[in-house]
Amino acid sequence: MSARILAITNQKGGVGKTTTSVNLGASLAAAKQRVLVVDLDPQANATMGSGIDKKKLRSTIYHLLLGQKRIDEVLVRSETAQYDMLPANRDLAGAEIELVEETGRETRLKDALDSVAQNYDYILIDCPPALNLLTVNGLCAAHAVMIPMQCEYYALEGLSDLINTIKRVRANLNSNLQIEGLLRTMFDPRNTLAQQVSDQLQNHFGDKLYRTVIPRNVRLAEAPSYGLPAMVHDKSSKGAAAYLTLAGELLNRHGA
């Protein structure tokens, strides 16, 4: 059995993509799943949040995408989160420009992951907050897209752009790409607008909306500064519990 590959993406920044990549990855690993987290964001927050020092890295996903290193030369282990990782650093920002002239530039990540997919149950790709060539690489490599979003007015505006991008990638580059689900993040049930947007999402997306809701939570916010997933930082926190629940929901969906 080959891995289920999920691109965690939303072109809007600050919606919890990296938080979801790291904490869902750690929660799946805690459920005895073999997990690989791919950091496709030049900010490298998933790398740092997994306890890996981006400044000390000799080989990163940048070298992999440009064909300078093999995937086994780039893979590192996050001891804190208990998953494997393709880490990033600031170099990755240059990959955009350098890949433009390359053949097969949209499928560099897919080609690399194909060689290791059988070693994992889940591969989670943390995409940058932009609809750029790095994100397209994530969408080409993925079976499905997980969309973290805050329940606010502008979130719905950006969602249609993202769905159009997914449709274009499906039409031209990856005909199997599906929307895995929408994840409500940083949710505050006391906020009336959040509740209204949540209801709209429920009406519009139905089964595609995860039942699990990720609350606004201090422990989730502070865990990355320690290089830890929330469940290692404070397993009893509401944020950690929510991601463990999400992992369970995902496993149930896929019959694992």
Image (spheres, rainbow, N blue to C red):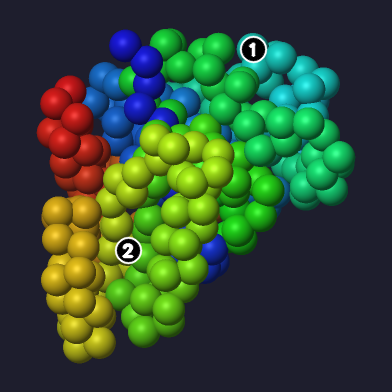
Disc 1 packing (10 Å; few <14; some 14–19; many ≥20): few
Instruction: Answer with the quarter of the image where residue 39 lies.
Output: top right
Name of the residue lying farthest toward the front? 171
Name of the residue lying farthest toward the bottom? 192
Which residue appears at 33% of the width and 49% of the height?
179
- 78 or 143: nearer the viewer: 143
- 232 or 250: nearer the viewer: 250
Q: Position of residue 114 (x, y in %)?
A: 53, 17
Instruction: Answer with the quarter of the image where residue 75 lies.
Output: top right
Q: Amino acid at mark 1?
A: Asp
- 144 or 151: nearer the viewer: 144
Q: Which residue is mark 2?
A: 185
Which residue appears at 60% of the width and 58% of the height?
131
Instruction: Answer with the quarter of the image where residue 255 lies.
Output: top left
Which residue appears at 30% of the width and 45% of the height?
180
Q: Position of residue 15 (x, y in %)?
A: 44, 65
Q: In the image, 204: left or right of 7?
A: left
Q: Quadrant of the N terminus?
A: top left
**Cα separation between marks 2 and 1:** 33 Å
Residue 72 is marked as: 1
Relative to 252, residue 183 above or below: below
Q: Amino acid at mark 2?
A: Thr
Q: Secondary structure at mark 2?
A: strand
